[in-house]
Amino acid sequence: MRTKNILIFSLISSFFLIFLISIWKILATLQGLNINSFNIEVIFVSGFFISLAQIGINDRIKNIYKSIIFSFAVVICDGYLIQKLPLWYNIGVFLILYFFTNKISKYNYNNLKEEHSTQVILFDFLTLFGILFFSFVILFPFYMMIVTSFKTQIALLVNPLDFSINFSQDIKDLFKSYFVIFKSYKFGKYILTSTIVSVGTVVITLLFAIPAAYAVARLNFFGKNFLSTSILIIYMFPAIVLVIPLYTIFSQLGLRNSIEGLLIVYTATTLPVAIYMLQGYFKSIPKELEEAAIMDKLSWFGIITKIIIPLSIPAISSVALYVFMIAWNEFLFSLMFLDNPNSFTLSRAIQYLSGDAETPRQYLMAGSVVVTLPVLFIFVYFEKYLVSGLTAGSVKG
Amino acid sequence: MANIKFTGVHKSFGSNKIITDFNLLGKEDEFLVLVGPSGCGKSTLLRMIAGLEKIDEGEIFINDQKINELHPSKRQTAMVFQSYALYPHMNVYENMSFGLKIEKRPKEEINTKVMQAAKILKIEELLERKPKQLSGGQRQRVAIGRAITRNPKIFLFDEPLSNLDAALRAEMRVEISKLHNQIKTNMIYVTHDQVEAMTLADRIVILNHGNIEQVGTPEEIYNDPANVFVAQFIGTPKMNILKVSQEEISSNQINFLGNNVKIPNVNLEKKNYFIGIRPEHFSVSDDSEYKFEPKIDLIENLGNEKIAYIKMNNHEISAKISSQNKIENQMGFNSKDIFLFNENGERIKS
């Protein structure tokens, strides 16, 4: 049993090592490094050997020395003997190996005895695989976007596959694309429009969604069930179906190219989900709290503003975040309704730029970064409000 | 200083009748306990007083003022909920002062009232804390404190102790009793726990299926139950109720546990009866009027007392005796401790 466990453990961990090093090699290639081969067999053998040695040595050598020795051995083998590669690449390999040996050091001769230990190991490594794979897949386009935005037109034309950033150039040249999009392409105005539209949508949506959700969650009225289920039916109509009738209506009402028009459409599209999310949370607030508030002489309006809203901050902020992101990134309606560059939102502006064949790619990418960053910062900031459990302590759970 | 009067109160949820024709007159400053099994309508009754539930029919008066249509906040009642219902986003002080703040009372008045209530309940050092930082007992104190600051004419308690553990419950029970002595106000207390009912109440109202089974002081309820339901509801272990068929009755005596028992001042007819006798009225001493040889199934030792489960003549009886006494082959009871009920479970008083 133990031999089998040790073998399986070594196999899984060496595959994991291959995965890690391969990612690093791909990244290094993108930085312009010329690597002859992936050396998969060498990495596999060394991974296997390290895993076995790790179990064999056990606690006889301190973990830190063990890790350093193994890492050095692999670095010399891969980075100097087979192919001479620059120092930064080898430092990367060293760090990966150090991480890897630390990771596997928790498995020792004793806990491999247990029958289910292979399952534990497999699950452990699968989780790591998953995290690394998805972060690679998700972060790579961001990385490309940022790198491209820091390039010059010439650099892009000379070697389009070069994904390194040239830090040796002047800081002014590095951020040139950003200066250009704000100066010549009026991105400042677009940001302002997008901000007004998004924040406006959040405010209006919440203004309607909170009372509506409260009514659906708490009050008894005729057609309540029909209403609460039909809220989501609105979402079954694809936006593209609505866009043409809306276009004609908005043209007649003179709402095209106006912020008001966008606010109406965005509010209408985000309201159903907002109500749906909020009513679920409102239902989870204990009814006794409201009854206590009624006895404290609070009116319905007072109950909503003084009890329900303070207790629903997590739900309200996640709804606000959701609505903001929808409004900020929305493209279809802004494409249809806005054709005057003076009233463009950010996403519409980027489409406008990319439609123009003469717009350099780095400007587009800089624009994309500008679109992405606010959402990122807002998400990080709001994240702390998303903690649930604010109602803890009100009633016995 | 208030009295409360119910006249012909009805309440139903859909076709489900919860309370039918409820009439009761509460005295001034009385501690009234509504007790009954779950689903008997006791909480609904309390919520009707508070105004959280509509009154279908009939009237409720507080100090001769009809409150049926009054807004909950104008009824001068304060409710302590089973789940405490403290506002989690406010600290203890804010929780207790919230109602007064809504009424826009002056700050000094709010402060003195909160401080007074905090002093009564010994929670002065907790005023800055949020409800989630309090233990169950402390939360319950704050909930009571919130009720006190409202200075109500009637306090309503909706099973306030049922979320607490046994030791804390006993402690809070004493506290509530003291509180009533301290602030002489009407209190209406709903519980399903007969111990709370017996220890706290000036008068107990025993409810079953929305009807009053009996109203009386704890002594009356215990010593003079009106029917089998009340007799069995109060007292642990519950009263032994044994069916007596007409064959077992002869010449005004009942053949009961091998004895011919004569019930004083009662003329027995040839009918079926129920005999009730409380477990604590069995004894092992020799000076009992009637004696029998028990066949003991099981003995539970509770430390200070023992409960013996006895099987005799198709009857299952429980008997409570002091644990110092040994159960030998004889047990006894007295005829004065026997309660007689007719076929319908109504008490035949001797």
Image: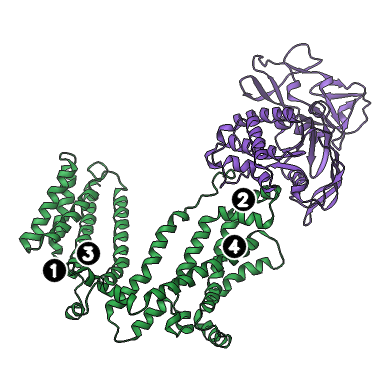
Chain colours: A green, B purple
Element on which disc 2 rests: loop
Q: Amino acid at mark 1?
A: Leu
Which is nearer the N-term, disc 3 or disc 1?
A: 3
Return the residue at label 2.
Answer: A286
Mark 2: few/some/many CA within 10 Å (<14, 14-19, 20+): some
Return the residue at label 1.
Answer: A33
Question: Where B11 sits versus B288, above or below?
Answer: below
Q: Is residue B161 visible?
A: no
Q: Are marks 2 and 1 in contact (CB under 8 Å)?
A: no
Q: CA distance from mark 2 to mark 1?
A: 62 Å
Q: Amino acid at mark 4?
A: Ile
Q: Residues at marks 2 and 1, common chain?
A: yes
Return the residue at label 4.
Answer: A210
Question: Residue A209 appears in which quarter of the rendering?
Answer: bottom right
Chain ID of residue with mark 1: A
Q: Nearer the viewer, residue A348 or A229?
A: A348
Indicate which label's residue lies in the foreground, 4 or 1: 4
Q: CA distance from mark 3 to mark 1?
A: 14 Å
Could you tell me which residue is drawn at 22 percent across and 52 percent down? A99
